[in-house]
Amino acid sequence: MSISTRISSPSRVFVARLAGTKVFDPLGDEVGRVRDVVVLIRLKGEPRAVGLVVEVPGRRRVFLPLTRVTGIDHGTVITTGLVNIRRFEQRSTETIVMGELLDRIVSMKDGSGEVIIHDVAIEQQRNLDWHVTKLFVRRRENSGLFRRGESFLVSPDDVRGLASTPDQQGATTFLASMDDMKPADLAEMLRTLPDERVVQVAQELTNERLADVLQESVEEDQVAILSALPTERAANVLDEMEPDDAADLVQELPDQMANELLALMEPDEAADVRRLLEYGEQTAGGLMTTEPLILGPEDTVAMALAHARRSAVSPAIATVIFVTRPPHETPTGRLVGVLHLQQAMREPPHALIGNFLDKDIEGVAPHDHFSKAARLMATYNSTIVPVLDEQRRLLGAVSVDDVLDEMLPDNWRESDATELDERSANG
């Protein structure tokens, strides 16, 4: 069933509400989702909206000229079907609404004080161009005689500072619109923002959320963001990261900064990172996490499922519970066997996991090349392989995502599957 190539557009579209909207071609097939709107801010007249930043499969963000949008209605965007899949690269004359205008502080021309932009409205004109016609703003606390926090609509011509780079710009509204984004998608979104805006957004993320985003970022972005944070905050973010990811990041930092951060980290977390730094980058020890799921043989199936169910546990790690003699933190006592999650789901909750173990487990040594772990995963259809010392004590585990990160090209997070024609703001 096809969708009409011309649908009625609402008279006014608010960009913050447009973010995340699905984009369809005329046949009704989904093309992607809207992530931002590109505008040109002029010295005179209303800013002109020229296109959408659309996220297409593969987490690539592309430019879709508004001349190729035939309608916006009922939570959907309809296109002509022609989408240039070259990665979006912002030009110097362009401003992205979500990334650069939301939360910007501007001054009212009538002298009534400063306001914060919370949303931007675009409207299609009779000549089919789209213009920024309204700003939804809120007064700052020091707004003089006016009611604190008052919200209202103004025209772009009613404010100063829309075109200039702001001295102060928060990220509250921007982050609220990206709240449901996966960390990898938010990391990719940050790559499209100016450097100073990236730092502003990072500063307003929680430590846990920022840690998740950094783990999905390229190395230069990781270093730049962490280096811009206060030292104590940076150490807290490292505490929240997986030990192997934290170790990789610490290796990229200047020695003095790395030592300062390790000294400020929680002792247990810092010890794990220091232990991982002892191994080579391409060894099993260098890639392993020191925090796989570990229980004793006397624990119950219900406890094993509860451990695997925790939101902080990645799917690759959750597939296997390692069962060891005490202690149950790495380095553990001798490895007894493993309980596969699928097996645990078949057994009664009160049963002891020691009765259902797979004891024929082959592991890797910490100094083995990571390719040995990859071969074991391929041979036994596993997502995680134990790293053992000479006494078969569990030191950690290498998961399939760790192996893939190492096997893929260094720039895989930045690479496009295809590079086609140059985009054009004029369609």
Image (spheres, rainbow, N blue to C red):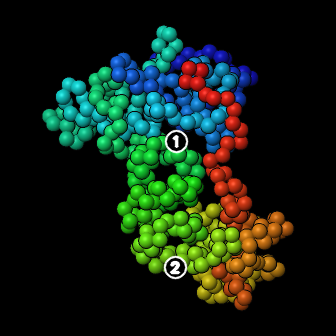
Q: How crowded is mark 1: few (under 14 residues within 10 Å), some or many (20 or more)?
A: some
| Residue lying at 61% horizontally and 28% vertically, measured from the top left | 423
Residue lying farthest to the right in this orientation? 379
Front residue of 311/80: it is: 80
Choose top left, top right, bottom left or bottom right for residue 85: top right
Question: Does residue 55 appear in this view?
Answer: no
Where 384 sits versus 104, above or below?
Answer: below
* Quadrant for the C terminus in the image: top right
Q: How many numbered circles does the render carry?
A: 2
Report the Cα–Cα distance between label 1 and label 2: 35 Å
Secondary structure under badge 2? helix
Kindly identify which residue carries mark 1: 192
Choose top left, top right, bottom left or bottom right for residue 140: top left
Residue type, label 1: Thr
Residue type, label 2: Ala
Q: Is residue 36 left or right of residue 363?
A: left
Front residue of 29/166: it is: 166
Kindly identify which residue carries mark 2: 271
Question: Residue 229 location in percent, x, y?
Answer: 40, 59
| Residue lying at 50% horizontally and 10% vertically, measured from the top left | 127
| Residue lying at 72% horizontally and 88% vertically, measured from the top left | 390
Secondary structure under badge 1? loop
Q: In this view, does 420 lie to the left or right of 273?
A: right
* Quadrant for the N terminus in the image: top right
Question: Residue 184 location in percent, x, y?
Answer: 58, 51
